[in-house]
Image (tube, rainbow, N blue to C red):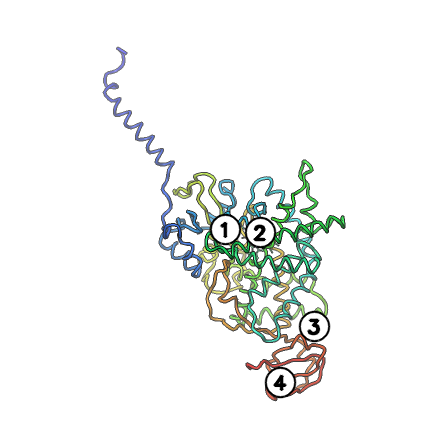
Amino acid sequence: MSGFPFYLVLSLPVLLTCILMSINKRKFKQRPKLPPGSTGLPFKGETYKLYSQNPNDFFSTKEKRHGEIFKTNILGCPSVMLTSAEAARFVLVTHAHLFKPTYPKCKEQLIGPSALFYQQGDYHTRLRKLVQGSLSLEVIRSLVSHIETIAISALESWSGGHIVNTYEEMKKFSFNIGIFTIFGRLDANNAEELKKNYSILDKGYNSSPSMSGTLYKNSVLARKRLSQTLSEIICQRKETRLEEKDLLGRLMNATDENGNSLTEDQISDNVIGVFFAARDTTASVLTWILKYLHDNPTLLEAVKDEQKVIYERNDEGSRPLTWAQTREMPFTYKVIQESLRMATVISFTFREAVADVEYQGYCIPKGWKVLPLFRSIHHNPDFFTDPGKFNPSRFEVAPKPNTFLPFGNGVHSCPGNELAKLEMFVVVHHLVTKFRWEVVESEGGIECDPFPIPQHGLPARQWLSYCIKEQLPSTFQNPDDILGIEPSLRGKLSVVYSNIFEKPMYQGEIAFHIPESR
Ligand code: HEM
């Protein structure tokens, strides 16, 4: 120690202080601050605020105040919302291993804990292959004529001039498509049971089990009945020993590398999961398409012109639509894309941080929910000029990568997106070539159900309007004089009524009637 320089001994405390400060600094660096933002009232958080107003307003107010990353409290969970395209990619694609899919437990129980979208890793990959297989382009191209039959029957059931809740009717339509995709042809009694109980389950899905609870309890009971019906369907399938290629068949016949099959519960959870993922999303977008076309008559005319060409090529609609024709609707496709962007029916998705994650200098603590906001990305003027304007022609140029995410991104992105778009093409084709419709409450705002839908589900009236020229004498060539057809009378009673003469005017094959309100 004798040779140890004295000045070093003197500077030792200074050195120690420096080392400690640098350790502290590193520690401080390791624990960045939480994102800015408010978490609302204790327990209640900001859930009500989010779901009771136009979600665009909620997100843009927050973003203006706090920037692209902010904290909040949704559904009783501390959460971080992220508004940028890079952040959505960070969470869903490049760092997806740090964020697991998550839903509130009570909701997970209603759908089924083994459903695809709550899963990660090998089980997710295995299930996803099965679901994706049943929704591949190869499979859905064989569904066109079935989708067409279901669409025509739905549209005809709304026509006649009475007011319908468009969203509710679209839900029935997308559920029927779901039934066909999952089971192929299904016995009518089983289909009815599934519809009835899914609708009860749906009514309680957004209620809380802790409140008086009747709706939630009813949902739980309906979920049990759904499992029973599915169990019977599975039993019937086993008896026939047919290896069907629909989703149920694929789930029933799948085995893992050890030869294990999926359990009946796993099959049920995934069937109900697909209904859940498919029904309200598709119905909500279809409802918005009707509203946007109604609000933009010039665009409606352009869609009609495009569809009329196909209609005429199919001998005035007497031949069915083909898969190739559904791929040749460029303007209609832009309308669909713009509707998906404007409405962004999945405003955000839920993930949970599996570790403390640092993002842009902020800490997202382990266990917090992380919500990439698709809606904010779709309404960002840097990506979509004048984002509040419905302008399908913006899709003449492909959006920048990772900025158009109606079907999500990464390993959990939507496997049903091609089916959903096919449903839209088919419905729009028949709607604009054979029907006229009038929105009853066109000025209304947005309602969250929890998917954003037009106010009150877009009440509308619809009339069948085809065959007019061929069926009527020259005095009745103006379609405005002929507003409706009563489906129950079609082909049976051959009388046309006019709103001008208020008496039967024409004997033909089809009976039209004019609603009294005209
Ligand atoms: C316009 C209609 C639809 C929209 C906007 C939509 C949107 C989405 C989005 C954004 C996701 C990702 C969620 C996440 O990352 O957490 C998703 C997942 C999913 N969608 Fe769709 N979807 C639609 C229709 C459908 C249809 C028709 C089906 C099936 C028939 C379907 C089945 C699924 C399934 C099973 C998942 C979960 C995938 C996984 O976790 O790996 N969706 N959907």
Q: Give the Cα separation between the discs numbered 1 and 3.
A: 43 Å
Label 4: state its secondary structure.
loop
Residue 509 in percent (x, y) is at 72, 80
Label 3: state its secondary structure.
loop
User: Which residue does the numbered mark 3 point to in the structure image?
Assistant: 316
Residue 217 in percent (x, y) is at 53, 54
Mark with earlier residue (4, 2):
2
Mark with earlier residue (1, 2):
1
Can residue 472 be seen by looking at this rendering?
yes
Mark with earlier residue (1, 3):
3
User: Which residue does the numbered mark 4 point to in the structure image?
Assistant: 498
Residue 299 in percent (x, y) is at 55, 69
Q: Which mark is residue 481?
A: none
Q: Callout 1 environment at 10 Å: few (<14), some (14 to 19), or many (20+)?
A: some
User: Which residue does the numbered mark 1 point to in the structure image?
Assistant: 349
Q: Give the Cα separation between the discs numbered 1 and 2.
A: 12 Å
Mark with earlier residue (3, 2):
3
Q: Callout 3 environment at 10 Å: few (<14), some (14 to 19), or many (20+)?
A: some
Q: Give the Cα separation between the discs numbered 1 and 4.
A: 52 Å
User: Which residue does the numbered mark 2 point to in the structure image?
Assistant: 414
Which amino acid does the dot numbered 3 rest on?
Glu
Specify whether tag 1 is near ligand 1 (CB below 8 Å). yes
Q: Give the Cα separation between the discs numbered 4 and 2.
A: 48 Å
Q: Residue at x 38, y 54 (%)?
A: 62
Mark with earlier residue (4, 3):
3
Mark with earlier residue (1, 4):
1
Which amino acid does the dot numbered 1 rest on?
Thr
Q: Nearer the viewer, mark 4 or mark 3?
A: 4
Q: Nearer the viewer, mark 1 or mark 3?
A: 1
Q: Nearer the viewer, mark 3 or mark 2?
A: 2
